[in-house]
Image (tube, rainbow, N blue to C red):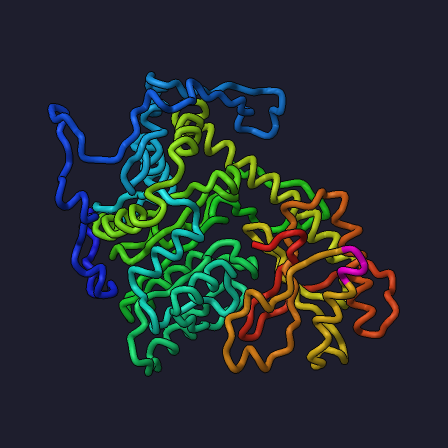
Amino acid sequence: LPQAKDLSHLFVPTFRIHQKSPFKAVMGTPTLDMINMAGGVPHPSTFPLEQVQATVRAPSHAAPGRTGTLSLERTQTNGSTESLNELLQYNDGRGMASYCRFLRQFTEQAHAPPYADWDVVASCGNTDSIAKAVSLFCQQGDHIIVEQYSFPGALSNLVFAKVKPVPVAMDIEGVDPVALDSLCSSWTGATPLRAIYVIPTGQNPTGATMSLARRKALYAVAQKHDLVIIEDDPYYFLQLGPMPETQDTTATDMNKLSLVPSLLSLDTDGRVIRLDSFSKILAPNLRCGWITAPAYIQDRMQILNESTILQPSGLTQGVISRLLNDTWGIEGWIEHLNALRAAYAARRNLFVTLARKHLAGLATFTVPTAGMFLWMRVDLGDAATDATAMPRLLDAMKKGGVMMAPDMPFRVANAAAAAAPERYLRAAFALAETDMFEPALERLARAIASIRGSELQDTQSVACAEPIETTAPAPIAVNSST
């Protein structure tokens, strides 16, 4: 395989020269025969944890009675995983060796990056990774391209960094590559556009998933305009497949359903920085994930980690490493992911079926093929142009006992967006119990009808999907703020 192209000319000046931490630059790396008295490192005998054990279920949700135990010992290496003394001690910004080793193996199997010198670095999840990736290519006053509806955590990062988001139009597959090409070709800003931030799979908030053809087109535009792509993909392994044509609300056999290739898998140049997280596929507060990028970019990521988080909790990395390396193994991990996909597909199927039943004439949507969100365009009738209509709808929903996320926190502000009526809701079908889906949608239907000033009629007709002009469809977030 070829080496990644050197895109270091796109770095902000701070990162164009590879730097080590000042302490490590002076001290170097101690050898085994040295008596190391340089660092402020506690002796491991002072760590109070003698052993950590956890009971874990089998990877398949279809076998609820099967459990196993993983353990971490103070001084003894646990299979492939480091001892507690190592996991609890300071380490570098790359991450624990066993944790990263599994993720390299899994990344190779899942994505097969088409260049030789890629690597992974441990992260504290994608929100932190977004901030670090952006900081490599954008400084105060710069601009970065984002989808016209985007993840609020990413937008907040840009506000704090004083980097200005430039929205690009979307359709039902996400970023419109023709609009992206036009935006880049006509750009007249004081500084060049160097990066685009995208969520290509189960997009938050719209639920849109780019087809392979769309991903190739986006990548070609990035090559043409020399853009780095920050691929934020926490929902990649929650690809759900198409909605069954029958009213069957069960899930497809996920073992037979292939995944849309990632942007990383198309990345012949090494211009994709891929962000993965365990938040949606193991548990959010593990606060662990990983970044995949060319080695010279990872050298900078290591510096950024060592100047902020150092690395994710070693104990958490150890638990994940022990689980994935030694308890489940990669085959068990893939079995777990397929079980997750099946569970969320069944939820999606049921929620969409009920939405079609209760929201006919009140909302339209495109069925998501990945992720956790249904993004719905709400038809407020004659009230649609009333600036108070959406706030009144949200108030009616709260009084009626249902919460979903309006489009405002996700929308990237520009003149066109400010003039458009706020007509979208995001529904998250991941958290609420499935027997609450129908009451939630009934309450939403009543709230919409109250704003329209119409009586709610009992109808079984289907709310059809509609094209999204220059905007993307809006998901209803049930009890979800992310």
User: How far from the left and from the top, in percent, is residue 48?
Assistant: 42, 22
Residue 339 showing in the rendered view = yes
User: How far from the left and from the top, in percent, is residue 136?
Assistant: 29, 60
Q: Residue at x 61, y 43 (%)?
A: 344
Relative to 134, 35 lies left or right = left
User: How far from the left and from the top, in percent, is residue 346?
Assistant: 65, 43
Of residues 456 and 98, which is closer to you in this image?
98
Q: Residue at x 30, y 80 (%)?
A: 190
Of residues 435 and 136, which is closer to you in this image?
136
Relative to 440, 473 lies left or right = left
User: How far from the left and from the top, in percent, is residue 274?
Assistant: 36, 51
Q: Residue at x 59, y 39 (%)?
A: 342
User: Where is 275 relative to 91, above or below?
Assistant: below
- Residue 83's quadrant in the figure? top left
Span colored in magenta: 397-401
- Residue 60's quadrant in the figure? top right
